[in-house]
Amino acid sequence: MAEPVAEPAAAVAEAAPASVVGRERRVPIKGVRKATAQAMVSSAFTAPHVTEFITVDVTRTMKLVADLKQDPDMAGLRVNPLLLVAKAFLVAIRRNPDINASWDEAAQEIVYKDYVNLGIAAATPRGLIVPNIKDAGSLTLPELASALGELVSIAREGRTSPAAMSGGTVTITNVGVFGIDAGTPILNPGESAILAFGAVKLQPWVHKGKVKPRQVTTLALSFDHRMVDGELGSKVLADIAAILEQPKRLITWG
């Protein structure tokens, strides 16, 4: 008797129950999505992630955003809470520069950087991309607003160049635009830290000894524990929170 012939593996994999035939779509994994997936898997399993969270009263920051929208120096620029979060992050890095580094496995060295290329995670029809603002730490607030606006516009139009996505040192992901309170962001490969900015919501908060409605958000900072210990990560996150709670610190610290 002849031996039964095994059905080809590909045919088995492609077979689907009759109940789902015509109700599934298959899309090839390629382009930006494929590159992003490979990078995120590599990062998650190469860099030991630690994430810390803090909830912050950002009422004064939201007032400052409203004031800046009326400032002649900011006319025509994109002014939003992300702008001040980015500025606060940059000031925190200036105060704690060792957070801005990368791990060189081949050379067995930590590379500390005296410049900040600030990545902004952007959801586009092509998938998630992370273009960065070169030398963001050297920009004034109007210059930073202009750079952020240009970065977002180019990303939405699908015109982000490979050069704009290379060389990042730290990143911000604004999950709040989707109504999300917090998350555990995965580091962009080669970077030391990523900050997740959650939704700003009106919540009851103890302010000056009384419970009052205040604008509140949650920040989450993930960092590479090979080169950033808990003390350094905590200092950076605490500085960002302190600035957003009392944005006048941008003047004294920045």
Image (tube, rainbow, N blue to C red):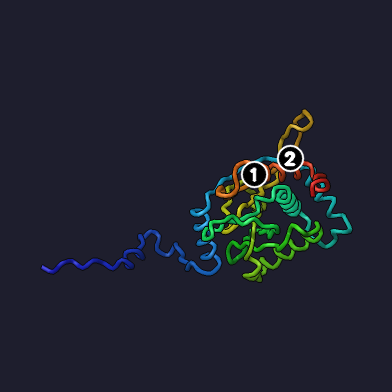
Q: Residue at x 63, y 55 (%)?
A: 101
Direction right: furthest residue: 72
Is 232 situated left or right of 249 in this image?
A: left
Q: Residue at x 78, y 46 (%)?
A: 61
On the image, which quarter does residue 152 sit in? bottom right
**One can see residue 230 in this view:** yes
Q: Position of residue 193 (x, y in %)?
A: 62, 52
**Depicted 236 relative to depicted 167: above or below:** above
Marker disc for residue 57? 2
Q: Residue at x 59, y 44 (%)?
A: 229
Quarter occupied by the N terminus:
bottom left
Direction left: furthest residue: 1
What amino acid type is highlighted by mark number 1? Leu
Q: Residues within 10 Å of mark 1 (few under 14, many from 20)?
A: some
Q: Position of residue 25 (x, y in %)?
A: 46, 65
Direction top: furthest residue: 209
Marker disc for residue 232? 1
**Depicted 73 relative to depicted 200: above or below:** below
The answer to whether the residue labelled 2 contacts the one labelled 1, judged by CB atoms less than 8 Å apart, is no
Q: Residues within 10 Å of mark 2 (few under 14, many from 20)?
A: many
**Depicted 246 relative to depicted 91: above or below:** above
Task: Determine the secondary structure under disc 2.
Answer: strand
Q: Position of residue 81 (x, y in %)?
A: 75, 51
Is 30 situated left or right of 245 in this image?
A: left
Q: Position of residue 52 (x, y in %)?
A: 61, 43
Q: Residue at x 89, y 58 (%)?
A: 72
**One can see residue 158 in this view:** no
**Depicted 243 relative to depicted 205: above or below:** below
Eye-nearest disc, 2 or 1: 1
Nearest to N terminus: mark 2 or mark 1: 2
